[in-house]
Image: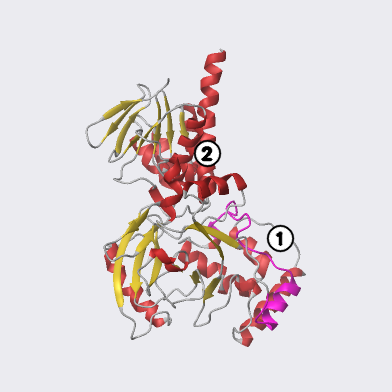
Amino acid sequence: MPDIVILGSGMGGLGAAYRLHAECVTPVIYEKNAYYGGQTASFRYDSGFLFDVGPHISFTKDTRIQDLFADSVGQQYETIQINLNNYWRGYWPQHPVQLHLHGLPEDVIVRVIDGFAEERHAPERPVRNYADWLLASFGRTFAELFPMQYTRKYHLTTADNMSIDWLGPRIYRPNLAEMLRGALSPSAPQVHYITHFRYPAAGGFASYLRKFVPPGSLKLNHELVSIDHRARRLSFANGNSAHYDALISSLPLPDIIRMIQGAPQYILDASRRLACSTCVLVNVGVDREDLSSAHMTYFYDEDICFTRLSFPHMLSSRNVPSGTGGIQAEVYFSDKYKPLTGSPGDWIEPVIKDLRRCGLLREEDRVLFSTAMLVRYANIIFDLERASALKTIHDFLDDIGIAYCGRYGDWGYLWTDESFKSGENASQKILDRMQARVNS
């Protein structure tokens, strides 16, 4: 039996383990934290409030993954019709805004539709970046007032510095009739890539991982510090070391490249060109549950410190004490574009202040609980340096025989089911290599 090692126990790492177990191969998983789950972990605090590490829901249309997740929680999950909205300059349009202009200032609606119609008749122009795509899709007024503004808050760079590799179904492009209907009527249909989602009835999103944690082969509190890829040896901060015949990593690429002994300078330089956001999650518990009609709200205004809010008690009532509500705010930074200064806890009061400013918290509401956590790697930033830097790094890892998976190994905009399948694919590469050796 070869020694197959998996680094990281999030969706990617556990997907890799699941695929190997299907072939009766038992890997060893090393995890730096005292808990498994990575970015899909969940924490219940002494106050009784439960918060996930970010707003995780399962909306996969892959029935195999649906069944796996459902089985992992013993079929105990909620199926919820999603409701999303936005906050822009004191207005609360439904999501996506381009289909729900009704209620915005009249002059804004007129300028948006005029710009949209004008763009429909403009000569076709090359799309070199995300800004070009937005202008061609929506016209200048809408692009500048909404998605370009949100890009600066969420991606922390400008739209003209971003590729369109990540778009997929994420941003809906309406026709003129759809936009007019949403401007004239408050009951325009919601069109979004998410319609319904599932969430565990108890235990938070991390409950979906239970089935995939291999008994006896998960090593917690093992923070990797060095990889000798020639000797196939790993060294950990606790003094332990381990040999491997095959290695699968779900660790962030900048971290693993830094740990590889003898990594060439051009590889180290490429890893520094990769950009991602860092997120301060501010979790707030309130003595009222009727906080919002939406499961998630997007905030465009740059003088509001958070970019997105989610409400854990609307996913499962067991996430909070009876009669209370939970709010999770996301405040974004980036080492490359907008470094974080101070500590995560410094953002608790600004978040609460802005929750009151936009009216989600009333003056009489009591904050029962608050905490902040730092998510060092949050969202991949698809800036114009990403593609070339990523190919350089992936080619290097392929050459030295290290398989990679998950959002931060693939360095892509992967949802949870995609991260799980990315891990499965990484294991399949290892299995194929093993079979090739046997055949030769």
- Can you tell which mark lies on residue 125? 1
Q: Is residue 202 above or below residue 418?
A: below
Crowding at dot 1, Cα within 10 Å, few <14 / some 14-19 / many 20+, comes out as few
Q: In the figure, is residue 182 to the left or right of 35?
A: right
Q: In the figure, is residue 120 to the left or right of 257?
A: right
- Can you tell which mark lies on residue 391? 2
Residue 1 in the image, given as x and y percentages of width and height: 42, 20
Q: CA distance from mark 1 to mark 2?
A: 28 Å
The structure residue drawn at horizontal position 35% and vertical position 21%, both measured from the top left corner, is: 231
Nearest to the observer: residue 57 or residue 389: 57
Q: Is residue 307 visible?
A: no
Nearest to the observer: residue 246 or residue 228: 246
Q: Is residue 48 above or below residue 408?
A: below
Q: Is residue 430 above or below residue 250?
A: above
Query: Mark 1 against mark 2, which lies toward the viewer?
Result: 2
Helix, strand or loop under label 2:
helix
Q: Main secondary structure of the magenta part?
A: loop
Residue 269 in the image, given as x and y percentages of width and height: 41, 41
Q: Amino acid at mark 2?
A: Lys
Residue 107 in the image, given as x and y percentages of width and height: 63, 86
Numbered range of the magenta stretch: 160-188
Q: In the figure, is residue 425 to the left or right of 256?
A: right
Nearest to the observer: residue 83 or residue 336: 83
